[in-house]
Image: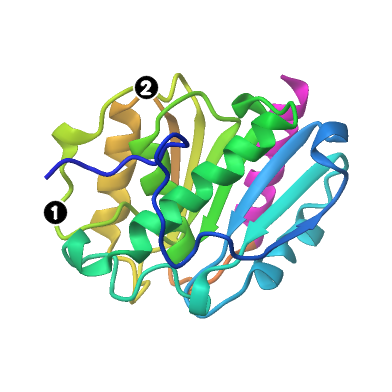
Amino acid sequence: MTLFRAHSEDPFEGPHQGGPVSTTGPEPEDAAVCMILIHGRGASAESILTLSREFQEPGVHYVAPQASGHTWYPNSFLVPREQNQPGLNSGLQRIADLIANLEKRGVSKRNILLLGFSQGACLACEFAARHPVRYGGVVGLSGGLIGAELPTEEYEGSLEGTPVFLGCSDVDMHIPLDRVHATSEVLKSLGGSVETMIYPGMGHTVNQDEIDRVKMMIQGVRQG
């Protein structure tokens, strides 16, 4: 099975195309950094956009797409990928469209950070692995690559040293620890500069250490 890769010439049409987005911060043209925030299952663009208040970093344009029905794909991220269609491909295309729109407004991929939580983290990691280039950074909070099996031979290209941060609990009922480590290995093999933090006993949430690490990534992009 060849992995789907989103592109603008023949875009995938699915449930998440044309949906609303929420934004905060300066316009992309006036921002030093742009961050795409991808919400989890049952959540909303507005809810994940509140992370911007936690980061408290000036000069950042935040954009958060809304999934149709508040869910990017219907089943667990650990089932065969075809069981999560068309939502999975539609979500990947949505991220690609947001990046393309930012580029049209003069933003380099090197100044774009992808951040997702839970289902959104799975989508962000999967997007980066299928579309590896030099991004400003990739953040997967409580998530991992998608599929019953990971087709490591089908992930091709280079992240060119993109900073990647993966954070998760060691007892997260939704995210097996071995999938977090497998995701780390795949992204390392694609040339990502990957840091993985496992937090003992943490719930399915975002903690202060993760927020602080993302702040440092934002600062790193700003400093170039």
Q: Name the residue: 43% across, 65% down.
A: 119
x%, y% of residue 159?
A: 42, 25
Residue type at the position of mark 1: Glu
What is the CA distance from the residue labelled 1 to the residue labelled 2? 21 Å
Q: Is residue 86 visible?
A: yes
**In-image side of 16 versus 174 (left or right):** right
Residue at disc 1, secondary structure: loop
Element marked by disc 2: loop
Query: Measured from the top left, where is residue 8 in percent x and y?
Result: 47, 37
Disc ID at residue 61:
none
Amino acid at pointer 2: Ser
Q: Residue at x 20, y 69 (%)?
A: 83
Give the class, few, some or many, for how many residues have Cα within 10 Å of label 2's Cα (few <14, many ≥20).
many
Q: Earlier in the sequence, mark 1 or mark 2?
A: 1
Residue at image mark 1: 149
Q: Give how far across and how far down residue 30 sits, in percent.
A: 88, 33
Q: Residue at image x 14%, y 54%? A: 149
Magenta stretch containing residue 223, yes or no? Answer: yes
Residue 126, image x, y percentages: 36, 47
Predominant SS along the magenta part: helix
Please tell me which residue lies in front, 197 or 74.
74
Quarter of the figure with the N terminus: top left
Residue 92 is left or right of residue 45, and the answer is: left
> Which residue is disc 2 drawn over?
158
Q: What segment is highlighted magenta in the picture?
A: 208-224
Labels 1 and 2 touching (C-beta < 8 A): no
Is 104 rendered above or below residue 214? above
Q: How is the image coloured?
A: rainbow
Left or right? Give the position of 86 relative to 224. Answer: left
9 is within the stretch colored magenta? no
Q: Is residue 110 above or below residue 61?
A: above
Kindly tell me whether residue 122 is visible in this rendering.
Answer: no
